[in-house]
Amino acid sequence: MNNEITGAEIVLKSLAEQGVEVVFGYPGGAVLPIYDTLFKQNSIKHVLVRQEGGAIHAAEGYARSTGKTGVVLVTSGPGATNVVTGLTDAMMDSVPIVCITGQVPQHLIGSDAFQECDTTGITRPCTKHNYLVKDVNKLSSVFHEAFTIAQNGRPGPVLIDIPKDVQFASGTYEEKNKIIIPSHRLFEPSPDFEKNKIEEAVELISKAKKPIFYIGGGCINSGPKASTLVREFINMVGSPVTMTLMGLGVVGSSDKNSLGMLGMHGMYEANMAMHECDVMINIGARFDDRVTGRLDAFSPNSKKIHIDIDESNINKTINVDVPIIGDVKQVVEKMISVWKDKKYKIDTNSLNLWWDKINKWKEVDCLNYNNEGKQIKPQYAVQRLYELTKNTKTFITTEVGQHQMWAAQFYKFEEPNRWLTSGGLGTMGYGFPAAIGAQVGHPDALVVDIAGDASILMNIQEMSTAVQYRLPVKIFILNNEYMGMVRQWQELLHGGRYSESYTDSLPDFVKLAESYKAVGLRAKTTDELDDVITEMIETKNTVIADIWVTKEENCFPMIQSGSAHNEMMLSKDQKQDKKSAEKGKILV
Amino acid sequence: MNKSVYASPDQVSETKRHILTVLVDNEPGVLARVIGMFSGRGYNIDSLNVAEVSNDENISRITIVTHGTSEVVSQIEKQLLRIVPVHSVTNLDQEGSSVEAEVALVYIYISDTNKKKVYQLCDFYRARKIENENNTTIFEIAGASERVNRFIKEINEITKVEIVRSGPVAISSIKKNEEE
Ligand SMILES: Cc1ncc(C[n+]2csc(CCOP(=O)(O)OP(=O)(O)O)c2C)c(N)n1
Ligand SMILES: [Mg+2]
């Protein structure tokens, strides 16, 4: 009886023992006991957002930029339903999150009580796991298990729903090391199976004539060491490498082996190399449809090696020849030692021929755009942003749309964990709160949200959060007054019928910033751009930089839906025949 | 293998019936997790059966009958294993040999004209009459689904019936080391 504490205290104690420094949240009736306990302590910081959706994206940004688990605290009912998008986002992009929701007291559950909803029911498919805790004595073990599950194997969001009476009830706290989690609840790869496959894989690579590494977000989730090892291995092989949207930064943009991003808006040379390679080494990517294009024409002549921690990704959409289930860091470490032990070396002649071919593809200069005139091209704006921030420790987040793709194409990432974007779910409104989270995790770094005029409005209320906590986040809006990506698809696939994609009645973003006591800047022409960017960087305050860009620019190159890697559309082919374009329209 | 409109490159194997046995922690919501995975990812459940396993009350055994190509079923197995409280997934068809059975209860509309035929048929299929306070004619038949199907087809030809079926449960018949 003596060492009993309340459920709310157990929550805080569990978080503290898990090393949590910051919680992103929003209060309400069903979590008041937890907020009360929060008030009485000062080891854990709370960041008050302005909408729960902002809390979970902030936690994602925090998690992805620091490698720690992001923690969210929200109330029952609308508090819980507001985090559903973020949970799904974290699920798709494998971000470790622990989300605490309040629930109505147990005796009211099922009675349609005020602010009651079936939170565990609603979030079951968009969490790795979730709990409704009915017994205060189980609370600490649930928390410790939740943190382990969020981080273990393929990371993801875990939700803990706590009825209010459980928060008030007294119970005993159990320490982390007293909790034994049964192994079936966690990921454990079998080591022997891997070893054979690793030897097989490395031998296959050594015999390749036209190899390519295809790198995904799994390499980032495996920790910074994984990126170092991946780079080392690629260097030993001398192979070209391409990265997915989620994998940018694993291999530096300036690395001689890097072909940049692949996929729908990826580099021509990267997609062509994927199409023509003879050995593909997929490390921590999942053959997403944005990457593969048409499946029946995907890299038709290659042997494929697939390293993934999640077995369900193996043969899900693309059949592979050598699957390896495991953590990137461990697997690549073993691959390197096998390569060294066997003194493997790729045939230099064929490798040179392969590179010659790739260098020819590079000559296409697929990112080329027409940069004439005084109006700012969105691509140019990102290029200038890169040039003026490249010597500063910078984190880039994005919203979703054309600006996101231009950011991925034109901003050069040299390190992992610096690029935060919503890849799997494509959530507009992700970038700004994610930037807030990244800034909380890295108070001294420069954090820029490359945004679109439509997306930014989805979580604009977080201006208030950024200003309150003196977070000098920069919002860099590529303002084309359109839902540009929607407009582009309508132009290419729907006969130029721009149905509801013009964003009329936009706010004056400068005044908007000022109304929150932040700083608003604007660039209307190319000669204003550098000054605005410089001022934005130097301002020690939250900034919205409203960059007026050409309105009808399209994002190229592009693999249209239903096309293959070797059927990329370049900006010069824009005027193509309408019929073939309309074919792809049923696809997303 | 996948149902995406981005056509799949691989030759697809033939669609077959599969019986999966899933051992799970007996905790709230576990069945919803399993069923939700099927509906959310567009897989089929032909029948489903859940009960605690007798020797350990913390574990339940879910028997699921599904159909699909071997690619789809292998994806189902892997998706099931991602669910945290799932211990193991066994595809009994792939194990080579297994035994399955189900139970059906059949309410039979009986009259003087069909009575004899009904009883003969039930006798033939070794269906057992279940006594009840209303004295209606209810038979229980157990066995392989095929057999139950045949019984139902034939009894339907004789008279009107109402049927409830449990769906099959199955167990691997491979010899285990019985010393243990
Ligand atoms: C929450 C949400 N709703 C709708 C979409 C569909 N969508 C994708 S891009 C886009 C337009 C984005 O416009 P903007 O933010 O201005 O970016 P731009 O493409 O103009 O750079 C929309 C509506 C989405 N991705 N997310
Ligand atoms: Mg726009």
Image (tube, helix red, strand yellow):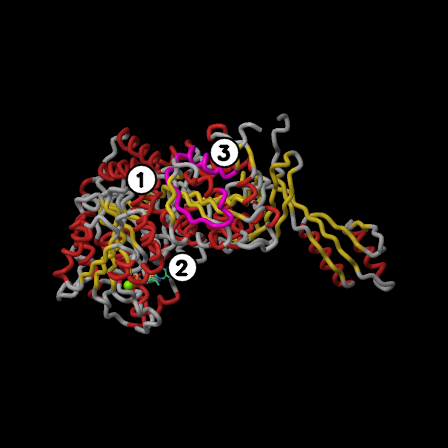
Tell me where residue A453 sits by quadrant: bottom left
Is ligand 1 less than 8 Å from the beta carbon at label 2?
no
Does the image show residue A326?
yes
- The chain carrying label 3 is A
Q: Which mark is residue B7?
A: 2
User: A264 or A565: nearer the eye?
Assistant: A264
Disc 1 to disc 2, C-alpha distance:
28 Å
Read off the residue under disc 1.
Answer: A204
Disc 2 to disc 3, C-alpha distance:
38 Å
Q: Which residues make up the magenta segment?
A: A7-33
Tell me where residue A213 sits by quadrant: top left
Q: State the SS at label 1.
A: helix
Q: Is A25 inside the magenta-drawn segment?
A: yes
Q: Position of residue A184 (x, y in %)?
A: 51, 36
Is residue A107 found left or right of A325 in the rendered image? right
Tell me where residue A38 sits by quadrant: top left
Q: State the SS at label 3.
A: helix
Read off the residue under disc 3.
Answer: A183
- The chain carrying label 1 is A
A112 vs A207: above or below: below
What quarter of the picture does the C terminus of chain A occupy? bottom left
Does the image show residue A210?
no
Q: Position of residue B125 (x, y in %)?
A: 76, 51
